[in-house]
Image: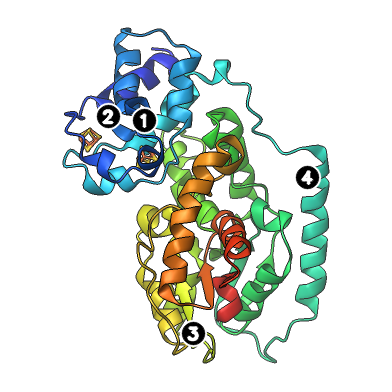
Amino acid sequence: MTAANTRLQEIHEIASKCDRCGSCLLVCPVYSVNSKEACGARGMVNAARALTKGDIAPEEAILESVDYCLLCGACIDVCASKVDVPQVMLKVRQQLVHLSEKPYAYSEAEKAQFEQAFADLCAHNAGLEKPELPHERKVSYFFGCQSRLGPIEPVVNTLRVLHTVADVELVNNECCGLPALTRGRIDEFVEAIKQNIQLYEAAETIVSDCACCTDTLKKAATYLADDPEWCKQAQAFSQKVVSLSEYLAKAGYQPPAQAEKITYHDPCHLGRMQGVKKAPRDLLAATGNYVELPAADACCGGPCFFPADYPDTAAALLAKKQANIEKSGAAVVVTECYHCLAQLQKAAANSGKFRAAHISEVL
Ligand code: SF4
Ligand code: SF4
């Protein structure tokens, strides 16, 4: 059986669990903005199932439908049949990748920016305070692409905090591969995983402060499970990955008191996809000035290419997020994802009533 046929069968198996109840439509963020059946979880899954049965042709309209999914996972939470909609969406994108002309790779200018960001980070890291004696724990930091494209301060804050609990090693890693995966470019994604596995072979623990990277790296092993040459290394690699807040909470890190009222936005890839909800809240509560955000886990519209591909929908989702942040009365909204952070910073600029920061800034 060819890889394409195997994938069609896998799509069919997952999509066939859908009984078309429509519960997901009540929570699907994109359906809440554009209430067309083809733009909601149920419609997307139905299109995928029709594709596998040969009822519809593999055409661009199908790709457009599955491309509109944020991969936020809100539908899985309410689905009685536990249909893994994001997985179906990703596999259909792989199946129809030949129809896609959307960019998925970084430009040469962006790659040069990544290298410069790593050099800048190394320079900042050299100036950070470190304990006289080495820690018992050692971590290797994962420096994601989105954080390399923005200001260096949030990342320096992450290192500042990490240095208080562990010895920190900097690795000039490759992109986690999520942009390629999101676009259905599975070969490029697997190549990125393999490169990172090799780069972090000697690492004890890999800490990431971006939810998208953390989730992708934790799941890397599932994509190499059938590869006899790589499966064991991939499993060992994924098991070493941990999010910043998980790591700090387990290490017993005590954040300093904060004068400003802080609220927290759950990145979909951290809260829903990894189940990491308590650790960031516990850390923030320890600052003495934490307030829960209404609908904290509602997607902000920021995943990967979504704001560039669908600016109007992303803006509509962000407007809801902004209203909730204002309702919370917080002076600062923090998060642990650089895609969410970029989106929240737009909300902060629109509002003028709060600012947005990476969680490391207030820890
Ligand atoms: S909630 Fe699940 S079973 Fe119901 S329509 Fe949505 S995907 Fe299908
Ligand atoms: S993953 Fe999110 S955007 Fe995609 S269908 Fe499910 S709820 Fe809708």
Name the spot of residue 205 as percent of width and height, x first. Answer: 53, 65
Dot 4 amino acid type = Glu
In the rendered view, tell whether residue 17 sits above or below residue 329: above
What is the number of callouts on the image?
A: 4
Q: Secondary structure at mark 2?
A: helix
In the rendered view, tell whether residue 35 sits above or below residue 9: below
Q: Earlier in the sequence, mark 3 or mark 1?
A: 1
Residue 164, disc = none
Q: Nearer the viewer, residue 24 or 104?
A: 24
Q: Secondary structure at mark 1?
A: helix
Label 3 – label 2 distance at C-alpha: 41 Å
Dot 2 amino acid type = Ile
Looking at the image, residue 129 sits to the left or right of residue 76; the answer is right
Label 4 – label 1 distance at C-alpha: 30 Å
In the rendered image, which residue does mark 3 sit on? 253
Dot 1 amino acid type = Val
Dot 3 amino acid type = Tyr
Mark 3 CB lies closer than 8 A to ligand 2: no
In the rendered image, which residue does mark 2 sit on? 14
Q: Quadrant of the N terminus?
A: top left
Q: Nearer the viewer, residue 221 or 227?
A: 221
Q: Quadrant of the C terminus?
A: bottom right
Tell me if mark 1 has few (under 14), some (14-19) or many (20+) residues whose alpha carbon lies within 10 angstroms of its own: many
Q: Earlier in the sequence, mark 2 or mark 1?
A: 2
Residue 110, disc = 4
Residue 88, disc = 1
Name the spot of residue 242 as percent of width and height, x first. Answer: 48, 63
Label 3 – label 4 distance at C-alpha: 35 Å
Label 3 – label 1 distance at C-alpha: 39 Å
Residue 143 visible within the image: yes
Q: Earlier in the sequence, mark 3 or mark 4?
A: 4
Q: Secondary structure at mark 4?
A: helix
